[in-house]
Image (tube, rainbow, N blue to C red):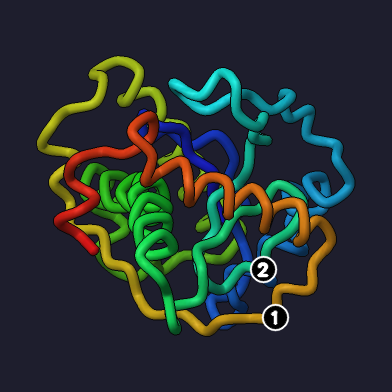
Amino acid sequence: MAWTDADYKFVYIDVGSYGTASDSEIFKTSQMGKRLSDNQLNIPPGRHLPNDDDGNVIPFSVVGDEAFGLGNHILRPYAKRNLNYTKRIFNYRHTRARRVVECSFGILANKWRIFHRPIDVNIDFCVRIIKACCVLHNYVRIKDGVKFTDTLYNCPMDNLTIINENNRGRNNMDSVRQYMSSYFISPEGAISCQYDKV
């Protein structure tokens, strides 16, 4: 489980969960998931979206995939059935944000080739290797900056099982998602490439 920034650096990682567990379950049981749920992460207050100074204040949120439910500071895409144009645009823009996290893992694996094969060591040592590689990854990102060739990694987006959305904060984040959907098709928030993708 990882949280990255826009420069492909890891801000938070949780290493050591079993691969059979779902991302949403790993997140809920992680320290980050628990602290987010309990409002203990010192998340800054929300802000207006760019070019929308008179609109709603939007809270900072974690971008999750379809496996996550809407919750306190968790924003997920709309379910993929019966989507209107506005919701398809939102899902496209949401996927663009999520892709940064996916690409961070691809960049990490391509830089540190140990991730191209099974790591045949005991579990504690494996956790240390992964944490060390993430620290080194961030160091290289800071030292070398973001290289265009790093962003060319083909980030897979597997289909995931949709879970129930009955989490705390669902109503608030649903209204945030609706507001952002309208914003993304407005002149203030639209980007030209979105219309070719949906």
* Residue lying at 26% horizontally and 20% vertically, measured from the top left: 145
Residue, disc 1: 164
- At label 1, counting other C-alpha atoms closer than 10 Å, the crowd grade (few under 14, some 14-19, many 20 or more) is few
At a point 65% along the width and 32% down the height, the residue shown is 56
- From the viewer's side, name the closer residue of 78 and 168: 78
Residue 38 picture location, percent across and down: 89, 47
Q: Is residue 10 left or right of residue 35?
A: left
Label 1: state its secondary structure: loop
Image-quadrant location for residue 76: bottom right
Left or right: 16 in relation to 168: left
Quadrant where the image shows the N terminus = bottom right
Amino acid type assigned to the residue bearing label 1 in the image: Asn
Residue 149: x %, y % from top left? 10, 37
Q: Label 2's element?
A: loop
Residue at (29, 55) in percent of width and height: 114
Residue 178 location (% of width, % of height): 58, 54
Is 90 rendered above or below residue 42?
below
Type of the residue with mark 2: Gly
Cβ–Cβ under 8 Å for marks 1 and 2: yes
Would you name the residue on which mark 2 appears? 69
